[in-house]
Image (tube, grey):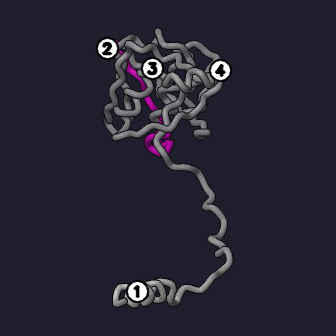
């Protein structure tokens, strides 16, 4: 009998004070840009961002040289940055320099654009990016520079990141 009374009391107490209510509005979803580290791959000849977990620019450059994931490739993403290339970030005299393990003149204009935009967006689009090799340094580039010219003729004017 004592158990039955305790059970009834517990049942009453657990429902005590909770009133039924309608749906409570939470407001609109937040708006604005998504600020996540991205690597720029290609869809056709256009840049396409892919979100990656990153611990800095060198980490993003590692993701870039690894290329798109299998799923991303199935979705049409590709890269012109050769998989065997090593890219490393340095800051020289306040300039962001990416050192490549190959002569940067051998990289296609789209590969250069992938590198420059990945680095520029990793540092909030701040400043131009210079790509260098063992004995060659290309002129500084901004994300969005023309891609149709050969690497030796790249413009150095500023174009805001897209």
> Real-space Cα distance between discs 1 and 2?
85 Å
> Real-space Cα distance between discs 1 and 4?
75 Å
Closest to the observer, 79 or 113: 79
Q: Which residue shows up at 56% across the image and 34% down it?
A: 49
Position of the N terminus, as image quadrant, is: bottom left
Image position, residue 150 (x, y; %): 57, 12
Mark 3 element type: loop
Q: Which residue shows up at 33% across the image and 12% down it?
A: 135
Instruction: Say which residue label 4 marks.
Output: 45
Q: Earlier in the sequence, mark 3 or mark 1?
A: 1
> Real-space Cα distance between discs 3 and 4?
22 Å
Instruction: Say which residue label 2 marks.
Output: 134
Image position, residue 146 (x, y; %): 63, 24
Instruction: Say which residue label 1 marks.
Output: 4
Q: Which residue shows up at 38% across the image and 15% down it?
A: 85
On screen, residue 103 above or below 22: above
Q: Which class describes the residues within 10 Å of circle 1: few (<14), some (14-19), or many (20+)?
A: few
Q: Which residue shows up at 45% across the image and 87% down it?
A: 8
Q: Which residues are magenta?
A: 120-135
Q: Are marks 2 and 4 in contact (CB under 8 Å)?
A: no
* Quarter occupied by residue 2: bottom left
> Real-space Cα distance between discs 2 and 4?
28 Å
Q: Which class describes the residues within 10 Å of circle 3: few (<14), some (14-19), or many (20+)?
A: some
Q: Are marks 1 and 2 in contact (CB under 8 Å)?
A: no
Instruction: Say which residue label 3 marks.
Output: 138
Image position, residue 60 (x, y; %): 40, 33
On screen, residue 6 above or below 128: below
Closest to the observer, 97 or 28: 28
- Can you tell which of label 1 and label 4 is closer to the viewer? 1
Q: Does residue 45 belong to the magenta stretch?
A: no
Q: Earlier in the sequence, mark 2 or mark 4?
A: 4
Q: Which class describes the residues within 10 Å of circle 2: few (<14), some (14-19), or many (20+)?
A: few
């Amino acid at each position: 009998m004592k158990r039955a009374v305790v059970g009834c009391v517990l049942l009453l107490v657990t429902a005590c004070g909770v009133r039924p209510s309608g749906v409570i509005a939470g407001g609109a979803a937040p708006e604005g840009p998504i600020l996540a580290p991205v690597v720029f791959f290609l869809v056709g000849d256009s840049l396409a961002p892919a979100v990656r977990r990153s611990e800095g620019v060198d980490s993003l450059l590692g993701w870039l040289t690894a290329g798109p994931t299998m799923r991303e490739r199935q979705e049409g993403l590709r890269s012109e940055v050769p998989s065997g290339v090593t890219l490393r970030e340095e800051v020289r005299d306040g300039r962001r320099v990416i050192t490549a393990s190959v002569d940067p003149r051998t990289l296609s204009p789209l590969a250069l654009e992938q590198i420059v935009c990945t680095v520029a967006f990793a540092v909030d689009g701040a400043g131009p990016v210079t790509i260098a090799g063992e004995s060659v340094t290309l002129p500084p580039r901004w994300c969005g520079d023309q891609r149709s010219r050969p690497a030796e003729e790249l413009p150095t004017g500023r174009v805001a990141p897209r």
